[in-house]
Image (spheres, helix red, strand yellow):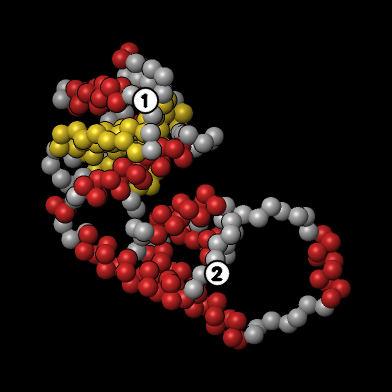
């Protein structure tokens, strides 16, 4: 089973072809993914075997000169060190043990878990603010947005427009947080954009918990088998208002 990052970033990371930002994003993903470190080990093994087999023939000097003349200079991407076999083996073994223990029971959620979750969600929010990443469906029509999500989720997404209360629906997208696919609704608040992350949960309802990370505020709560987390650089009072709007609408 391959995760979304393995399909998009793993090969580029191994070949040291990613930008510094993409490499950093993938390295954060490695802290939680069971599969990618193992695939990096396999790729290291394959690379070693191919080098030992010497399955190549040296190109003549004339061909090398011709290719170099046709190439355009490019800016370097990132200065990553050569992957080492022992590094990926150790990382894979450690991650398998840690993640297996962490997933034993949902009741093991701790403040550390909450901090890691908030950090990833804030990073996803910041990434979404880059051009072209905010929404996959750009619309303020609840039916259009709900229709775009149809068939992509395993739960009923509460697509709600709160324009009359100061939070206009802008659209939505899918994102990945801690190896899970999450739905995101985007709202234009009084002065700031707000991302509302949602995913299904088997845990019981929980009261809102608020925090901040690197200047961004977040509020997380669980209601009706859905976990919500709203995040923005807006004042905490704005996020509290949006949280109350979701909660009030869910009670109807």
Alpha carbons under labels 1 and 2: distance apart: 41 Å
Q: Residue at x 34, y 38 (%)?
A: 213
Could you tell which of marks 1 and 2 lies nearer the N-terminus? 2
Q: Residue at x 52, y 49 (%)?
A: 21
Residue 246: x %, y % from top left: 24, 26
* Left or right, 55 with reference to 201: right
**Circle 1 sits in a helix, a strand or a loop, which is it?**
loop
Q: Residue at x 55, y 76 (%)?
A: 47
Residue extending furthest top?
Answer: 164
Residue 236: x %, y % from top left: 29, 26
* Left or right, 98 with reference to 75: left
Q: Is residue 37 visible?
A: yes
User: In front here: 200 or 43?
Assistant: 43
| Quarter of the image with the C terminus in it | top left
- Mark 2 lies on residue: 82
Q: Quadrant of residue 73?
A: bottom right
User: In front here: 222 or 212?
Assistant: 212
Mark seen at residue 234: 1
Image height of 187 relative to 156, above or below = above
Residue 135: x %, y % from top left: 46, 34
Q: Quadrant of residue 163?
A: top left
Q: Residue at x 48, y 53 (%)?
A: 24
Q: Is residue 144 visible?
A: no
Residue extending furthest bottom?
Answer: 53
Mark seen at residue 46: none
* Left or right, 123 with reference to 221: right
Label 1, residues with CA under 10 Å away: few <14, some 14-19, many ≥20: some
User: In front here: 17 or 223?
Assistant: 17
**Circle 2 sits in a helix, a strand or a loop, which is it?**
loop
| Quarter of the image with the N terminus in it | bottom left
Image height of 185 relative to 244, above or below = below
Residue 223: x %, y % from top left: 18, 35
């Amino acid at each position: 089973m391959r995760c979304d990052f393995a399909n998009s970033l793993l090969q580029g990371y191994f070949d040291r072809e990613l930008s510094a930002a993409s490499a950093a994003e993938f390295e954060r993903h490695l802290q939680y993914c069971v599969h990618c470190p193992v695939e990096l080990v396999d790729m290291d093994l394959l690379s070693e075997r191919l080098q030992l087999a010497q399955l190549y023939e040296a190109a003549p000097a004339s061909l090398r000169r011709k290719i170099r003349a046709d190439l355009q200079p490019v800016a370097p991407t990132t200065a990553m060190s050569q992957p080492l076999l022992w590094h990926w083996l150790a990382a894979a073994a450690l991650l398998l043990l840690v993640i297996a223990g962490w997933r034993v029971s949902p009741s093991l959620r701790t403040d550390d878990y909450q901090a890691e979750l908030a950090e990833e969600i804030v990073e996803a929010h910041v990434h979404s603010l880059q051009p072209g990443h905010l929404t996959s469906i750009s619309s303020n029509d609840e039916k259009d947005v709900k229709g775009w999500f149809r068939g992509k989720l395993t739960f009923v997404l509460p697509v709600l427009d709160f324009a009359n209360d100061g939070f206009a629906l802008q659209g939505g997208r899918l994102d990945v947080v801690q190896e899970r696919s999450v739905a995101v609704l985007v709202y234009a608040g009084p002065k700031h954009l707000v991302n509302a992350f949602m995913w299904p949960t088997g845990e019981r309802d929980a009261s809102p918990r608020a925090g901040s990370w690197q200047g961004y505020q977040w509020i997380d709560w669980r209601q009706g088998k859905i976990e919500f987390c709203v995040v923005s650089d807006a004042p905490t009072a704005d996020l509290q208002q949006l949280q109350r709007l979701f909660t009030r609408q869910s009670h109807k």
